[in-house]
Structure formats: structure tokens, C-alpha cells
Amino acid sequence: MKKYICLVCDWVYDPEIGDPDGGIEPGTAFEDIPDDWVCPICGVGKDEFEPVNE
């Protein structure tokens, strides 16, 4: 599963970690996160994220 980075604040969503405080369990692919989820740091939506090139 790919990591995604927030284009506003550079926070990286790692699917192995998820976002437990945001209700996203570890092992959840970015594509499977609900559309109303927001970045836990700056509050922007999923449309402000792009895949991390590793």
C-alpha cells in the first residue's frame, strides 16, 4: 500500500499506521478512507494529498 503526503502541511499518511485518532485503523489503504476524512494536522480533505514517490 502506498503512502500519501498532504500538499499543505507535508504530513504523511502511512497505511501501516493509519490514523487511529481519526478513526482510521492500521492497514487501511488511502483509497479506502472515507471521503469526509481530513488531515489530522491541517484539516484539508483527501483531494489535497498525493502519492509519495519512494
Image (cartoon, rainbow, N blue to C red):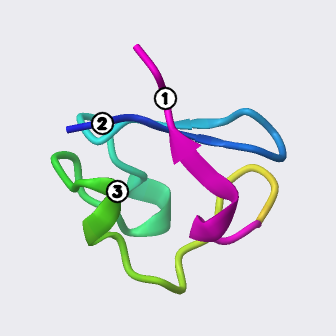
Magenta-drawn segment: 44-54
- Kindly identify which residue carries mark 3: 30
Determine the CA span between mark 3 and mark 2.
Answer: 8 Å
Q: Secondary structure at mark 2?
A: loop
52 on left or right of 33: right
* Residue plotted at (25% across, 69% down): 32
Asked if the residues shown at circle 3 and circle 2 are in contact, with their CB atoms under 8 angstroms apart, the answer is yes
Q: Residue 9 sits in which quadrant?
A: top right
19 on left or right of 49: left
Q: Residues within 10 Å of mark 2 (few under 14, many from 20)?
A: some
* Residue plotted at (65% across, 58% down): 39
Q: Amino acid at mark 2?
A: Lys
25 on left or right of 12: left
Give the mark count.
Answer: 3
Q: Earlier in the sequence, mark 3 or mark 1?
A: 3
38 on left or right of 51: right
* Residue plotted at (83% across, 47% down): 8
- Kindly identify which residue carries mark 2: 2
Numbered disc in front, either 3 or 1: 1
